Amino acid sequence: MTSEFVFVNFSKGSGAVGKKNKMATGSDHGLKRIVWKRIQDTIITDCRNSEVWKILILDPFTTKLLSSCCKMSDLMSEKITIVEDLFKSREPVLEMKAIYFMTPTAKCVDAFIKDFKPKPKYKAAYVYFTDYCPDDLFNKMRQACGKHIRVCKEINISFMPQEAQVFTCDNPGAFRSIYSPKSQDKTKTLETLADQLVTLCATLDEYPGIRYKKDGNMENAKLLAELVDRKLDTHYQLDDSGKKKEKTQAQLLIVDRGFDPVTPILHELTYQAMAYDLIDIENDTYKYKARDGLEKQALLNEDDMLWVKLRHQHIAEVSAQIPKMVKEISASKKQPDGKITISNLAQMMKKMPAFRKQMTEKTIHLQLAEDCMKHFANNVEKLCKAEQDLAVGADVDGLKVKDPMRTLLPVLLNPYSKHDKIRAVLLYIFSLNGTTEENLNKLIEHVKIEGEPEYIQNWKELGVPIIITPSFFSRKPNRRERSQEERYSLSRWIPTIKDVMEDVVENKLDTKEWPHQSECPAAWNGSGAVSARQKHRASTQDDRRTGSRLIIFVIGGISFSEMRCAYEVTRAMKTCEVIIGSSHILTPTVLLDDIKALSKGPMESFTLEVETKA
């Protein structure tokens, strides 16, 4: 995610302060709004009474966190005039108070102490930790510069609100730590993920019942469920009220990435998933070349309401809708509404400066959709048919695929990219629930990855059968009947997690396959019904919907398709809000590269420190 904040000093006399600015549109969405409200109710409220201008000092994680849910103008309206980097050299400003919002690590605490020893840089310090601060660090900080600290609080937000109903732990490295056979920090990583999940529940004011996907080959989901259960119990025992919190109308489901290996490697044709798979989008930033030859970029986030509207739609619908929107605007400006192209739009925008702002949003998505469709026309369309047949196990007419090799062969014989061929081979192996060693070697030869067979072999570390062995137990999950649902022929596969979401909301989830780590309240029956004894108390953070919450955590990354399912099920079920999260978000390329890297030894730890000279 690109940081919205630039570390600069805003002049006190800039005139940007006065009437409270309206929050950015994106922050009016779900998790981001809740997180910003929580920050306002803790950090901002403590400092609001002071007339003194304040400096906000952030570490890399809190910079990213704050950037995700508010803008610099929102901070300016709260008399925060400077945003600084904790780890960079700064000039003293003795007349100003400093707010430190940071993670409770030794590195952050040492940097904080450095600001007040031997001489203080600021008038006073207001310290806010994202999570529980270990006693040794707290005592170290208190002894070193306790007299300068006015406030020290833990606000329980150590997760990243990615979208309205999506969160991450901002930890792509967790994949390697958990799944690599050479990992030395698996337990520590699971502990950290558990702590982050507890802060999510605390921020949502939920005390959920916990369930996990039972797997004969993998223990990660069970271990994480136990950790979260224990830490939640401790968290709510330590509640300031002194009264133990009862379970709320929520469930937390924990599942390993190997539960559904198909979804994250398929070519998806819904707009967001397709764009992130086929276009080089980094930190949610789409870079493109305008017709005038200039390099431009656009941030794909919830501040862009057209992105929010289109992101889960099929590319066929998006490609039809955007030109239609442009034509409507063109007509309103008495522009000829012939064929809409980027070139035509560029000419129109040059002629009418007032028209430019209205058109920019549409132009970005017209360009992005065009880029996606170029890839689709080049090779993705042909790949999709083979992929869908292998994933679903049947062709578009519903006839069972009897010989998956006949479906795979055209992909191997065509000049597709190495990654595309690997994806097809994996789908073939998944469709058979594993293959023989002899057959696997032939496939590796076909794809010309003899020197890097780990792309395929290392899936076994996720508990996914690659080579058939008598000792390896694996059973494909039963799928929901969806034959009556209308779907595009090249988008027939439904992520397995959607079945799980619907089953749990309808109270149909198998308790043998999904054991309870901790029971949910009897009132939670998936319909949002609440017993008279335990009234549902709305969260203090927001005017949230009545009904229940389902939180799903996928160990090892989630795909954009799975994120989409949370919105679809919430919209369809109405009585239950589904929130989905993981250590990080996956694209097929990222996942394949991560799988390949599992064979490597632990990365050497190093610290890269960049300091600006004072």
Image (cartoon, grey):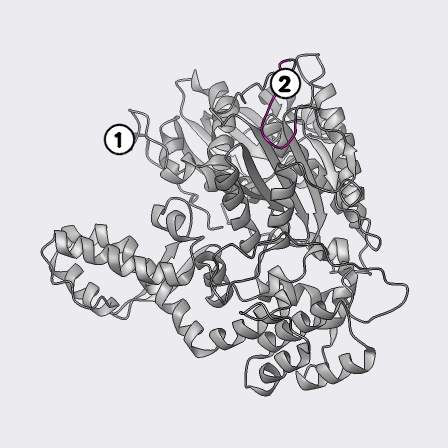
Q: Is residue 151 visible?
A: yes
| Region in magenta | 524-532
Taking depth in this image into account, of 288 and 384 the one nearest to the observer is 384
Across and down, in percent, residue 169 comes to 62, 44
- Mark nearest the camera among 1 and 2 is 2
Q: How many marks?
A: 2
Residue 224 vs 404, above or below: the answer is: above
Could you tell whether 161 is left or right of 392 in the image? left
Q: Dot 1: what SS?
A: loop
* Residue at image location 68% in from the left, 57% down from the top: 260
Taking depth in this image into account, of 5 and 510 the one nearest to the observer is 510
> Pointer 2: residues within 10 angstroms few (<14), some, or many (20+)?
few
Amino acid at circle 2:
Ser
Across and down, in percent, residue 99 comes to 51, 28
Taking depth in this image into account, of 6 and 37 the one nearest to the observer is 37
Pick out the residue farthest to the right.
471
Across and down, in percent, residue 22 comes to 33, 31
Whichever of labels 1 and 2 marks the residue nearer the N terminus, that label is 1
Amino acid at circle 1:
Gly
Q: Is residue 450 visible?
A: no
Residue 287 vs 37, above or below: the answer is: below
Q: Dot 2: what SS?
A: loop
From the image, tell me which residue sits under label 1: 15
Could you tell whether 258 is left or right of 398 in the image? right
Across and down, in percent, residue 258 comes to 72, 57
**Residue 531 among those drawn in magenta:** yes
From the image, tell me which residue sits under label 2: 531
